Amino acid sequence: MTLTINDTTMTSDRTPHTARQAPGRRHHWEVSWLPGQTLDRNTTITAMILADTAAHGDLHEGHRLWPHIQGWAAELGLTGPAAITQISQPPRDPAPQQQPAGGQLAPQQDRASGLPDKEAAD
């Protein structure tokens, strides 16, 4: 397990999940498996340790690491199973939507379904 912590990024050699300093927000961080949330640096380290440990695979209640998983997840406001489920999803880019060429804004996405919000396009 190697967690690399820099001034603006955090990466691991065991998981594709990453963390980065939130753009324009010096003391706030974004973690790829917790989209839409901003965390402080210490909580981000906890989230990355949890993702790194979960990359071990086959974590379940009764596993020798489970008490740690539950404790770290609780620090993030999650249960152990919920954290493992989220971590098992591929990383999401926390970057805001880019503006397409020609000065046109991209359609807003409906947060629940991920589909374009037709009312927002009107």
Image (tube, rainbow, N blue to C red):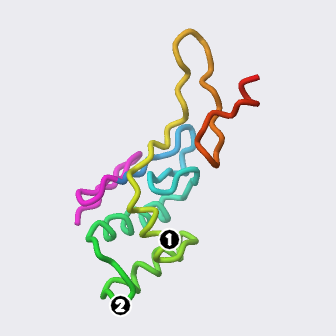
**Amino acid marked by disc 2:** Gly
Residue drawn at x 57%, y 53% is 38
Instruction: Give the image location of residue 45, x and y in percent.
Output: 42, 63
Position of the N terminus by quadrant = bottom left
In the rendered image, residue 4 lying in the magenta stretch gets the answer yes
Is 62 on the left or on the right of 108, as rendered? Answer: left
Q: Where does label 1 land, which residue?
A: 82
Q: Secondary structure at mark 2?
A: loop
x and y percentages locating residue 90 in the rendered image: 38, 52
Location of residue 16 in the rendering, given as x and y in whole percent from the top left corner: 31, 52
Residue found 54% across the figure and 69% down from its top:
76
**Residue to which mark 2 is pinned:** 62
Res 84 → quadrant = bottom left
Question: Is 95 positioned to the left or the right of 103 in the image?
Answer: left
Seen as rendered, the residue at the extreme bottom is: 62
Left of 34 or right of it: where is 9?
left
Magenta-highlighted residues? 1-16
